Image (cartoon, helix red, strand yellow):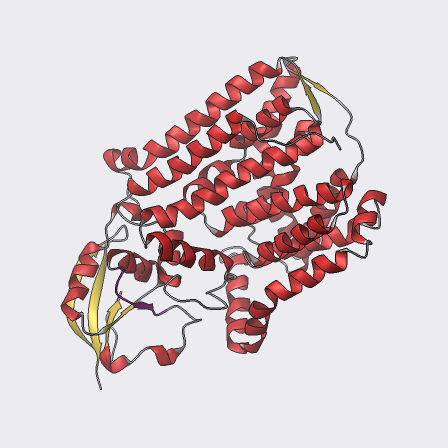
Amino acid sequence: MNKVNAVVSRKVKVIALFCFVAIILISFLKVALEWEDAEQAYYSQWFRLGYDDQPPLYTWVQILINKCVGLNRFSLAGLRAFWFSGTLIMFYKLVTKFVGDKLKAEVGVFLLFLIPVFIDFNFRRLSHTSMICFFSVSLYYVFSLLIVSKSYKNYILFGVILAGGILTKYNFLLILPAFGIIALFDVEAKQVLWNRKILLSVLLTCVLISPHLYWLFENKEYLLLLKESMEVKTKSNTLRGVVIITPFFSFLKSFINLIALSILLFSIAYFRKGVVLKSISRDWFSKLFIIQLSVTILIFVGINSSKISDRWLLPLFLPFFILLLNCFQFKKIEAWKKWSMRVFIFIIFLQIFRTPVEKIVGIDSSVHHSFSIIADKLDKFSEKQWNLPDVTYAGSVKFERPNKIVYSADDFTLPRTKIDSSNTIFVLKEKQKGFLVKDSVNGFGEAKETVYFCLKQN
């Protein structure tokens, strides 16, 4: 590993700032909120120790931002933009540590457009995934600092990042076994992990996550719902599958989706003499990749998962994109930097214009349908509590009426005592027995649903 000063280059700073502005700008081009922004608009109404099937840290930060600048497009998109841009910055610092070449580190950042889920789904709408990518890359960066300097400061940072990752998304826990195992195979990693100062990291992590863990294990009903949510997400409704084989190939498909464009580009560059293959040193980082790959496969096979999303794997393997860069010696590195930066910027511009172009050419999407009509109907019942059918509806209405507390029927972390059914207007997607319809909206949204505004009958 190279002892290179990882001061972020001006071009990477500019690209990070450009992405930050672009993500916020895109949110203003949408009539309605993306579902993850709507989710945060809803959950940030309250401080809780847990929300839905995600840990609470992202929403805690969202609450703080909302307190400072209010609930608006800037506060919702700005937080996502911060984590995405922060990931670019931290990735540059991590690459610089390993390749020792700032030009190559810049190329590494710009070539992240080769990971589809990172530059598309993650860029446009994902909240928790953006945050966990930041913590994942930061974790490896701080560990690289510990390899060089086993200071109390670095161990404290390591503990804070561990806690931050765990409190952001539960699949961050899939990273931890690899760090436990690497000590058995690498001397440098062993010196870090078997140092007595690691107890400081562990203690700090435990202290920071303990309130959420206490709340989690005290709520047996919530744990059951969390388990059911995980089963729904990891089991395909259409694929029964074969034990071991199905989860393995599901993982392989998603993993290939992450690296396919990179392999294609470098293969073409190799045969066109644009890069030269070189040997990779068997350091702690390359060993960690093998361990992380093996552990992840074993876990998904162990739970017999027949559905594995690309975005679940993104934070686990994003840092290891560095290994692919290290496989090659670039010829004409300046040329690589210029064209990769231009392509990166071009793709971001495509993302900016994507929403208005979709609307012009008639490609329907939920973000083209405003919830103002729902909020206007609910204004007739302003003295009552508002109960919406799901978090997307509730968050979107909350965004339209920031000063009104709204509730969601599928919020299983909401105490039932919060809702007084005798003083509540229920928004339903279909008529139900025991409810008196007071108003309705026909053909609402992308699904052209009929939405009913109902009172509960005694």
The overriding secondary structure of the stretch rendered in magenta is loop
Q: Is residue 96 visible?
A: yes
Residue at image position (26%, 63%) is: 403
Position of residue 142 relative to residue 215, above or below, is: above
> From which residue to which does the magenta span run?
402-409
Name the side, left or right, on which 249 lies relative to 77.
right
Give whichever of 355, 71 is nearer the camera.
71
Name the side, left or right, on which 16 lies relative to 293.
left
Q: Dividing the picture into quarters, in which one does residue 265 lie?
A: top right
Counting from the top left corner in percent of width and height, residue 259 is at: 60, 35
Give whichever of 320, 299 is nearer the camera.
320
Counting from the top left corner in percent of width and height, residue 450 is at: 21, 61
Q: Is residue 117 visible?
A: no
Position of residue 95 relative to residue 439, above or below, is: above
Q: Is residue 453 magenta?
A: no
Q: Dividing the picture into quarters, in which one does residue 293 lie?
A: top right
Which quadrant of the figure contains the C terminus? Answer: bottom left
Name the side, left or right, on which 258 lies relative to 199.
left
Counting from the top left corner in percent of width and height, residue 300 is at: 64, 55
Residue at image position (32%, 50%) is: 33
Counting from the top left corner in percent of width and height, residue 323 is at: 69, 33
Q: How many marks?
A: 0
Give whichever of 1, 320 is nearer the camera.
1
Identify the residue at the far bottom of this view.
Answer: 458
Which quadrant of the figure contains the N terminus? Answer: top right
